[in-house]
Amino acid sequence: EAQVTQNPRYLITVTGKKLTVTCSQNMNHEYMSWYRQDPGLGLRQIYYSMNVEVTDKGDVPEGYKVSRKEKRNFPLILESPSPNQTSLYFCASSKGQGLQPQHFGDGTRLSIL
Amino acid sequence: GQSLEQPSEVTAVEGAIVQINCTYQTSGFYGLSWYQQHDGGAPTFLSYNALDGLEETGRFSSFLSRSDSYGYLLLQELQMKDSASYFCAVRNYGQNFVFGPGTRLSVLP
């Protein structure tokens, strides 16, 4: 089954404790992306990757890191989480160019205390 | 900067037709996409317009006018299951995506 898998689905942690949210896709998609979703603000892109070893900042990259060492994986790293990073996070993937549909994971709800 | 605007809420009754508008301020983009998101779920792709005009996919249609910086999603024969949030989005030539704030559609019996 074609899917984007995120882990964990839920996480409650404390300020400053490094965490990683994993994302994996099995569709051989070139493009992968991370979004955060906050009430009234829609989905805001954090980082995206056009292919292996190619990453770029989206609209809200501050406080986040990503890596793309393999085509299927695109982890999101919060080196020193802060309460303003409490949000719902989605990973998505799509074929490389144009308006190819994005396939989203089920989401990760992060609470930073 | 780049931004998209949508109405925050729309309400309609079963069987009716509803139009969700999206206006944008951006340039150099591939086109306009639409996504649906049910409460507690992930966004799912509905349609896209690379060119101006109307695209029809079953009960859903989407429209784009680049000259007016405007698009809309048209939902016909509304069903209760259409109650969800709907997002317009653009993919810029710089390869980033920008989403609108979303429109919450409530379908009443």
Image (cartoon, coloured by chain):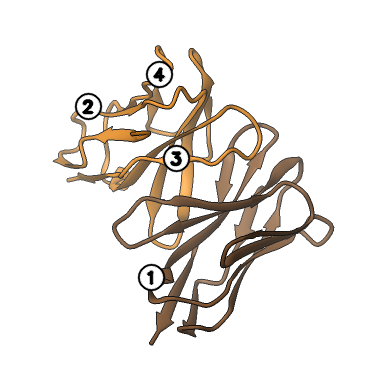
Tell which residue pokes out farthest to the front in this image: B58
Q: Is residue A38 above or below residue A73?
A: below
**Residue A67 got which mark?**
4
Upstream in the sequence, badge 3 or badge 2? 2
Q: Amino acid at mark 2?
A: Lys
In 3D space, how far apart are the residues under numbered discs 3 and 2 (Cα atoms)? 27 Å
- Chain B: what color? brown
Q: Give how far across and how far down residue B28 sits, in percent.
A: 76, 40
Label 1 belongs to which residue? Answer: B81
Q: CA separation, marks 4 and 2?
A: 15 Å
Q: Position of residue B64 (x, y in %)?
A: 74, 58
Mark 3 falls within which chain? A
Q: N-terminal of the two: label 4 or label 2?
A: 2
- Residue at the disc numbered 2: A18
Q: Distance of mark 3 from mark 4, alpha carbons?
A: 19 Å
Residue found at x 28% / y 47%: A86
Q: How packed is label 4: few (under 14 Cα within 10 Å), some, or many (20 or more)?
A: some
Q: Chain of mark 2?
A: A
Whether callout 3 and callout 2 share a subunit is answered yes
Residue beneath the point at 67% across and 32% down: B94
Q: Which residue is mark 3?
A: A103
Looking at the rendered structure, whether the residues under marks 1 and 4 are on a common chain is answered as no
Q: Chain of mark 4?
A: A
Q: Quadrant of residue A97?
A: top right
Q: Looking at the colours in the rendered structure, which chain would you say is drawn in orange?
A: A
Q: Are marks 3 and 2 in contact (CB under 8 Å)?
A: no
